[in-house]
Image (spheres, grey):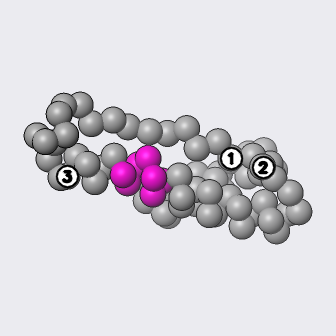
Protein backbone atom coordinates (compact mmCIF):
# COMPACT_ATOMS: atom_id res chain seq x y z
CA UNK A 1 0.00 0.00 0.00
CA UNK A 2 1.42 3.36 -0.91
CA UNK A 3 0.82 6.76 0.69
CA UNK A 4 -1.95 7.79 -1.70
CA UNK A 5 -3.81 4.50 -1.20
CA UNK A 6 -3.49 4.85 2.57
CA UNK A 7 -4.91 8.36 2.50
CA UNK A 8 -7.78 7.29 0.23
CA UNK A 9 -8.58 4.43 2.61
CA UNK A 10 -8.73 6.73 5.63
CA UNK A 11 -10.74 9.37 3.77
CA UNK A 12 -13.20 6.66 2.73
CA UNK A 13 -13.60 5.60 6.37
CA UNK A 14 -14.18 9.22 7.40
CA UNK A 15 -16.76 9.65 4.65
CA UNK A 16 -18.58 6.53 5.83
CA UNK A 17 -18.34 7.10 9.61
CA UNK A 18 -18.20 10.94 9.52
CA UNK A 19 -15.10 11.20 11.75
CA UNK A 20 -11.93 9.39 12.81
CA UNK A 21 -11.40 8.61 16.49
CA UNK A 22 -8.89 5.78 16.46
CA UNK A 23 -6.40 4.05 14.19
CA UNK A 24 -5.33 0.45 14.71
CA UNK A 25 -2.35 -0.51 12.57
CA UNK A 26 -2.82 -4.26 12.38
CA UNK A 27 -1.75 -5.07 8.83
CA UNK A 28 1.37 -7.13 8.51
CA UNK A 29 3.12 -9.72 6.41
CA UNK A 30 5.85 -12.25 7.03
CA UNK A 31 8.54 -13.68 4.80
CA UNK A 32 8.82 -17.44 5.09
CA UNK A 33 12.27 -18.98 5.09
CA UNK A 34 15.67 -18.57 6.64
CA UNK A 35 17.10 -15.07 6.85
CA UNK A 36 20.31 -15.99 5.03
CA UNK A 37 18.33 -17.21 2.02
CA UNK A 38 15.69 -14.47 2.04
CA UNK A 39 15.77 -12.35 -1.12
CA UNK A 40 16.26 -8.65 -0.45
CA UNK A 41 13.04 -7.93 -2.35
CA UNK A 42 11.03 -10.01 0.15
CA UNK A 43 12.73 -8.28 3.09
CA UNK A 44 11.90 -4.87 1.62
CA UNK A 45 8.25 -5.93 1.17
CA UNK A 46 8.01 -6.88 4.84
CA UNK A 47 9.46 -3.51 5.90
CA UNK A 48 7.24 -1.62 3.49
CA UNK A 49 4.02 -3.17 4.79
CA UNK A 50 4.89 -3.58 8.47
CA UNK A 51 6.78 -0.33 9.10
CA UNK A 52 6.19 2.15 6.30
CA UNK A 53 2.49 1.32 6.03
CA UNK A 54 1.98 1.87 9.76
CA UNK A 55 3.95 5.14 9.63
CA UNK A 56 2.06 6.53 6.64
CA UNK A 57 -1.36 5.67 8.10
CA UNK A 58 -0.41 7.03 11.53
CA UNK A 59 0.94 10.25 10.08
CA UNK A 60 -2.18 10.97 8.03
CA UNK A 61 -4.64 9.85 10.71
CA UNK A 62 -2.77 11.88 13.32
CA UNK A 63 -3.13 15.05 11.28
CA UNK A 64 -6.85 14.43 10.85
CA UNK A 65 -7.40 13.63 14.53
CA UNK A 66 -5.38 16.65 15.66
CA UNK A 67 -7.45 18.95 13.43
CA UNK A 68 -10.67 17.51 14.90
CA UNK A 69 -9.44 17.90 18.48
CA UNK A 70 -8.98 14.27 19.54
CA UNK A 71 -8.25 10.71 18.71
CA UNK A 72 -6.23 7.76 19.92
Let me know if residue 71 is in the magenta part.
no
The image position of residue 37, as x and y in percent, is 11, 40
Nearest the viewer among 65 and 40 is 40
Q: Is residue 5 shown above or below 25?
A: below
Q: CA distance from mark 3 to mark 1?
A: 28 Å
Q: Which residues are magenta?
A: 47-53
Q: CA distance from mark 3 to mark 2?
A: 33 Å
Q: Label 2 belongs to which residue? A: 72
The image position of residue 21, as x and y in percent, is 80, 48
Nearest the viewer among 27 and 4 is 27
Quadrant of residue 36 within the rendered picture: top left
The image position of residue 9, as x and y in percent, is 58, 51
Q: Residues within 10 Å of mark 1 (few under 14, many from 20)?
A: some
Given contact means CB atoms under 8 Å apart, are the residues at marks 1 and 2 in contact? Answer: yes
Instruction: Determine the main secondary structure of the stretch shown in magenta.
Output: helix
Mark with earlier residue (3, 2): 3
Q: Label 1 belongs to which residue? A: 23
Q: Label 3 belongs to which residue? A: 41
The residue positioned 64% from the left and 53% from the top of the image is 10
Q: Which SS class for mark 1?
A: loop
Amino acid sequence: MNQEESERLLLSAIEHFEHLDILVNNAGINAIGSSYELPLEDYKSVLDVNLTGAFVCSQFAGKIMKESGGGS
